[in-house]
Amino acid sequence: MKWTRSFSLGLSLSLSTVPAWAALGGTALSGAAVPDWAVGNARCSGTLITPRVVVTSQQCVVDSQWTGTHHRKTDWSYGGLAVWGVPHIGPIGDVGLILLSAPFDEVEPVALAAVPSYRDEQALLSDPGPAPDGQPDDRAQGTALAVYAADGVSKDFKHGARRLTAYLNRAGGRAPYPDATPLTYRSLAWLRRHEPWWMGPQTGLFAPGLYARIYTAPVSAGGLQFSDAEADAQLIAFSGEDPAQAIVSPINEADGDRGGGLFAIDAAGTEWLVGTVSGARLQTRLSAHWPWVFRTLLQHGLRADAIDLARSVLGTGAWAAQDPYATEGDIYLGEHPVSGQIEFFRLIRRDGDGGYGAFPIDQRDNAWWAFLGTRLPDRRQVIQGMKATGAPSGTAAIAATATTTPPTGTPTAAEATPHRPLDGRPAPGGPLGPFSPLPGSAPALPAPGAAR
């Protein structure tokens, strides 16, 4: 049986009778207000990014015994396979997947979390200008963030969710007070320049030992020797706490917040998935790991899901339907007309009339297109354009044995994908489990030469 219906009597009644901030802060959501993509279980939260793929924290799928995931709007319960990549270092690489045995939209359509393109995500996660001399940082300035977590007020992990957009102000005694300072993005590089008291081994922003592991420990001792820019490519910081004023993070991993979606809010109010909750202060930046997610989906037969994700993060998914001309410098996904293999190409030149030829089919460049390989390009390759090389980033960058990331071929040993069925039983059908692609397939891009 692919899905089951479960019931919980009485617990969800407290959603409408207890103020959302009375215990934990944020806004309690129930019924139609719960996003379609909000899922979770008693221990963790997760976010639906395709009909069969939930992204969550690696700690949730490795350190706990998952028995299924609940759709928090309807309480439908689904099972599947828990998958994770290389060992994480605190919030760095703290990404896990739930590959569902049945699509969430099998019963009725569901809205998926909005995944921004690499370029849009880069624009969203940008710092505000510094505060005027002598003035404190205005935490209301900058990109607003929202976290979707379990409803820790009712303690009912199956029904409802909680939306966190501000720190908690617990001043005035033991009783909690309403939300205070808003959650806004700040890079670690910005903090080092403007609020250097956060950047050190004993500042409260970093868990014990984490600062040294990221910045100062030698590679021979397991250190990463990251610059702030490299750390920012992996992390999203919450840094607006002020213990002296009793302003604290609203995230509570013990109440099921870990693994929840972290969203950046644009000027129009649209919420875009940019991270997963790893802890109270430092979160995992998902764009560093989309190439690993793409490869993992292909390994498990979820081809249509992988294609949809790739087109979203490349930002060129709508090109074939809406734009007769590709944009020079952009990267496009193609499906080989004979083998069906998914390949990636960058448009490097157009003719005088604006036209261009078809994708090459021999895994080489031609006069118009540069062949980039079969792995999803990473954020740096897309944003830096033709200047970028194939150096590793994201999950590959933190693998202890990964030294290079070839553009094609099989994954390295460091990129192997452990997995465990959610119900604890061995995965039938071999190590990749019994998955089959969703019915149908995303339409392939027509030959670009047709646009001439």
Image: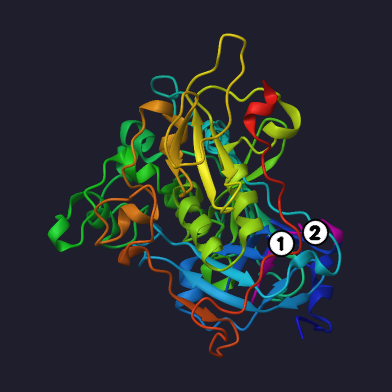
Per the rendered image, the range of residues in magenta is: 32-42
Residue 418: x, y in percent?
A: 43, 74
Q: Nearer the viewer, residue 145 or 293?
A: 293
Magenta residue check for 41:
yes
Assess disc 2: are there few (<14), some (14-19) or many (≥20) residues with their C-alpha within 10 Å of its C-alpha.
some
The residue pinned by badge 2 equals 110
Which SS class for mark 1? loop
Amino acid type assigned to the residue bearing label 2 in the image: Val
Q: Is residue 389 left or right of residue 439?
A: left
> Marks 1/2: CA distance?
8 Å
User: Could you say where residue 409 lies in the image, as x and y percent from the top left?
Assistant: 38, 56
Image check: 377 left or right of 140?
Answer: left
Residue 263: assigned label: none
Residue 285 appears in the figure = no
Q: Secondary structure at mark 2?
A: loop
| On screen, residue 359 above or below 237 | above
Quadrant of the image occupied by residue 62: bottom left
